[in-house]
Image: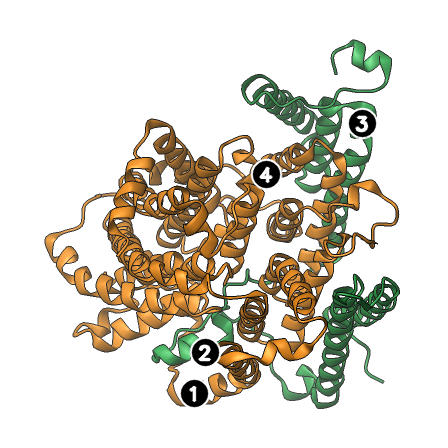
């Protein structure tokens, strides 16, 4: 088992330099995470330029901390403002805000942080148990790697959004963007229009920052000058002993739900945390308290959310396949720092791999300590009128994109991607498949070309062996299930959903 | 004949653009060569991507046509358009996992009115001009103009306040990047301005 390596990773992280970057990442992530609409994907894409110039380990440790910081920031606004910073905090708004309304915002935040820490810790333990299986993936040849990439792609496209045609369009757009530049196989310049700036393709950071960052700013700005939100007070900080007792088992159950759901590519955090909420409500003896400030309704979903955040990295570390937009952006960050996400990471850079896994614990520990004391700071940030925050974000994006290559061309790419992301949001085209297409496109193409080069053009290479056949079977199932999923969901929903009063949420 | 409302018209526009763009991409991509001696050519994946894009656009257009045929205008049924909560709470964990409304996608912004489009246009235009003028006017002037424009026209701040905040932000960010992070920011290529240190 990899617990020795984990200890080694912890030793690497516990250096003043790495701890500082983890701390900085947590604070910056929380700062961006509390901004309305900015979830982990937007936060990581926005802050990638901050890590330019750092060594690979420090950069990834900082980005992982930003990711968690943003998730915690989203929880703070969910509890105090009833604004989920990200979709997976929606379950927390149900009881967290009610607790805050009763003057128990502090305990709600502490419970959320403790449950998140438990979720993160269980996620890491599971990670350590599963990590050795990455050796199996080392046996994969180019055809299997192509099929695994295709599987990830099929699962995400099948699960993203409610409309398969729109998800397919988004994924195809990502693939199309990925084909710009000089082809790696034969060296032909594709869609470059003789512009040298396009020979290396459209920069990942610029595209991601536009799609997730600028599109969000445009979406907010269209509303015009906004009022300042009025968050509830944190008041008393510490939870009671009863609160802790009541949240212990929900945290554990939520962690397990989140961990296993995170292993399945395409399972979104929002659905997982709501599933944990539904499970707790069903199990609890105090089910009538749910929606009125039950700590179980915070502990379960928050633990599930964080365990999922950790376990969703497992497919990336073991197979090199990102399974969500946030993990895809992390995969891009790995590549930018010269690291190849996947089983080769454990073989070629085990120190870095285990340091990153260990940093997940350290990051959660830092956030556990910082979450509540800093809540008041974030409330002060939220009192800054949004138009000034927007100006600061735009200036940061402009500078950050420019600093990628010291070229204004990247700013134009970011702008184009931002407008595309904004239009896609308006017509409800999901953005996750686009980013996955962008990241998985080159992998698909490279392994496809290599497979056919090895088999001398024989397409039968993808049907050889039990692994390939199993993968093809799962891909077909994923596509079929994705197509019928909306139907199943609506049928089940009709039977089981108790309508939640719109006024309850609109209050 | 029914007239299209703005959101549906935009859906038609994007679906049509997907079909046209996808087909163009597939045709140009095929020109790079679909095969070569070692297997597939440089044009194979662009052709696949373009074809998928066009296919998605066609499927979407079919859905839009079907929706138009079955749609019953709200005024006929007497329904009022309500602002429903974007996410539902369900009693069942399984439904929560399968429900489309529980995806991690950002909530779609409301469809903008004319002023909303103008705000989006001003921000996009300001960024576009700033990027194009950056080599000519240098960072400090470009950032001041970009932020000043956005704060005045989009955020509706008073002119003096917009200028003050824009100048402050431009100088502060220049200080942070150049002095603390050691990243050189472009200066103006116009001699007079570069002589002033801008």
To which chain does the residue with label 3 belong?
B
**Dots 4 and 1: beta carbons under 8 Å?**
no
Q: At numbered mark 2, what does the secondary structure look like: helix, strand or loop?
A: helix
Q: Residue at x 76, y 39 (%)?
A: A409
**Dots 1 and 2: beta carbons under 8 Å?**
yes
Q: Which mark is residue B135?
A: 3
Give whichever of B188, A188 is nearer the camera.
Answer: A188
x%, y% of residue A463? 59, 80
Q: CA distance from mark 3 to mark 4?
A: 22 Å
Residue carrying label 4? A393
Residue farthest along the left direction in this orientation: A241
Q: At numbered mark 3, what does the secondary structure look like: helix, strand or loop?
A: helix
Give whichever of B34, A124 is nearer the camera.
Answer: B34
Give whichever of A354, A164 is nearer the camera.
Answer: A354
Q: At numbered mark 1, what does the secondary structure look like: helix, strand or loop?
A: helix
Q: N-terminal of the two: label 4 or label 1?
A: 4
Give the image quarter of residue A132. Answer: bottom left
Q: Which mark is residue A492?
A: 1
Q: Are marks 1 and 3 on the same chain?
A: no
Q: Nearer the viewer, mark 1 or mark 2?
A: 2
To which chain does the residue with label 2 belong?
B
Give the image quarter of residue A269. Answer: bottom left
Give the image quarter of residue B38. Answer: bottom right
Q: Which chain is green?
A: B
Give whichever of A266, A11 is nearer the camera.
Answer: A11
Q: CA distance from mark 1 to mark 2?
A: 9 Å
Q: Nearer the viewer, mark 3 or mark 4?
A: 3
Classify mark 3: residues with Cα within 10 Å, few (<14), some (14-19) or many (20+): some
């Amino acid at each position: 088992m990899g617990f020795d390596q984990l200890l080694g990773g912890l030793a690497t992280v516990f250096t003043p330099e790495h701890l500082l970057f983890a701390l900085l990442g947590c604070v910056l992530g929380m700062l961006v995470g509390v901004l309305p609409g900015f979830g982990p994907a937007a936060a990581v894409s926005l802050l990638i330029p901050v890590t330019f110039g750092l060594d690979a380990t420090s950069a990834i440790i900082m980005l992982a901390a930003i990711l968690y910081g943003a998730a915690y920031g989203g929880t703070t606004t969910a509890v105090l403002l009833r604004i989920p910073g990200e979709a997976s905090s929606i379950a927390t708004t149900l009881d967290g805000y009610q607790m805050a309304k009763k003057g128990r915002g502090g305990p709600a935040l502490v419970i959320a942080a403790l449950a998140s820490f438990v979720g993160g810790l269980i996620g890491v333990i599971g990670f350590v148990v599963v990590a050795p299986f990455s050796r199996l993936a080392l046996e994969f040849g180019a055809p299997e790697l192509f099929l695994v990439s295709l599987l990830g792609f099929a699962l995400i496209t099948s699960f993203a959004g409610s409309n398969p045609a729109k998800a397919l369009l988004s994924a195809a757009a990502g693939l199309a963007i990925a084909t710009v530049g000089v082809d790696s196989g034969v060296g032909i310049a594709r869609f470059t229009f003789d512009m040298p700036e396009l020979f290396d393709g459209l920069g990942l950071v610029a595209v991601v920052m536009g799609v997730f960052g600028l599109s969000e700013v445009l979406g907010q700005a269209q509303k015009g000058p906004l009022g300042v939100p009025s968050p509830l007070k944190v008041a008393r900080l510490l939870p009671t002993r009863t609160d802790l007792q009541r949240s212990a088992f929900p945290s554990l159950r939520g962690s397990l739900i989140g961990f296993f759901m995170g292993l399945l590519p395409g399972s979104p955090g929002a659905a997982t945390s709501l599933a944990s909420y539904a499970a707790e409500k069903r199990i609890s003896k105090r089910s009538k308290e749910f929606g009125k400030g039950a700590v179980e309704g915070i502990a379960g979903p928050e633990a599930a959310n964080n365990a999922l955040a950790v376990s969703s990295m497992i497919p990336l570390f073991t197979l090199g396949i990102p399974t969500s937009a946030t993990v895809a952006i992390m995969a891009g960050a790995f590549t930018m720092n010269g690291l190849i996400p996947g089983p080769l990471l454990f073989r070629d850079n085990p120190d870095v791999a285990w340091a990153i896994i260990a940093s997940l614990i350290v990051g959660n520990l830092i956030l556990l300590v910082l979450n509540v004391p800093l809540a008041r700071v974030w409330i002060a940030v939220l009192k800054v009128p949004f138009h000034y925050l927007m100006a600061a974000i735009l200036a940061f994006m402009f500078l950050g994109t420019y600093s990628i290559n010291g070229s204004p061309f990247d700013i134009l790419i970011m702008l184009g991607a931002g407008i595309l992301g904004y239009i896609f949001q308006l017509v409800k085209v999901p953005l996750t498949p686009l980013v996955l297409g962008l990241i998985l496109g080159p992998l698909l193409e490279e392994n496809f070309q290599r497979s056919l080069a090895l088999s001398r053009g024989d397409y039968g290479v993808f049907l050889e062996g039990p692994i390939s056949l199993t993968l093809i079977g799962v891909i077909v199932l994923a596509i079929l299930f994705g197509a019928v999923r909306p139907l199943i969901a609506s049928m089940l929903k009709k039977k089981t959903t108790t309508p939640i009063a719109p006024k309850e949420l609109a209050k | 004949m029914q007239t299209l409302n703005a959101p549906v018209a935009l859906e038609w526009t994007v679906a049509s653009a997907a079909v046209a763009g996808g087909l163009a991409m597939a045709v140009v991509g095929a020109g790079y060569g679909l095969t070569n001696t070692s297997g597939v050519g440089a044009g194979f994946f662009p052709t696949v991507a373009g074809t998928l894009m066009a296919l998605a656009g066609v499927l979407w257009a079919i859905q839009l046509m079907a929706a138009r045929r079955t749609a019953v205008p709200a005024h006929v049924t007497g329904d009022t358009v309500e602002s429903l909560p974007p996410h539902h709470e369900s009693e069942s964990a399984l439904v929560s996992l399968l429900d489309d409304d529980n995806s991690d996608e950002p909530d779609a912004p409301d469809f903008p009115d004319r002023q909303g489009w103008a705000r989006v246009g001003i921000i996009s235009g300001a960024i576009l001009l700033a990027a194009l003028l950056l080599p000519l006017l240098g960072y400090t002037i470009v950032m001041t103009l970009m932020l000043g424009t956005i704060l005045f026209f989009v955020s509706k701040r008073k002119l003096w306040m917009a200028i003050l905040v824009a100048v402050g932000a431009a100088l502060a960010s220049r200080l942070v990047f150049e002095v603390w992070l050691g990243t050189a920011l472009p200066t103006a290529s116009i001699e007079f301005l570069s002589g002033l240190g801008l």
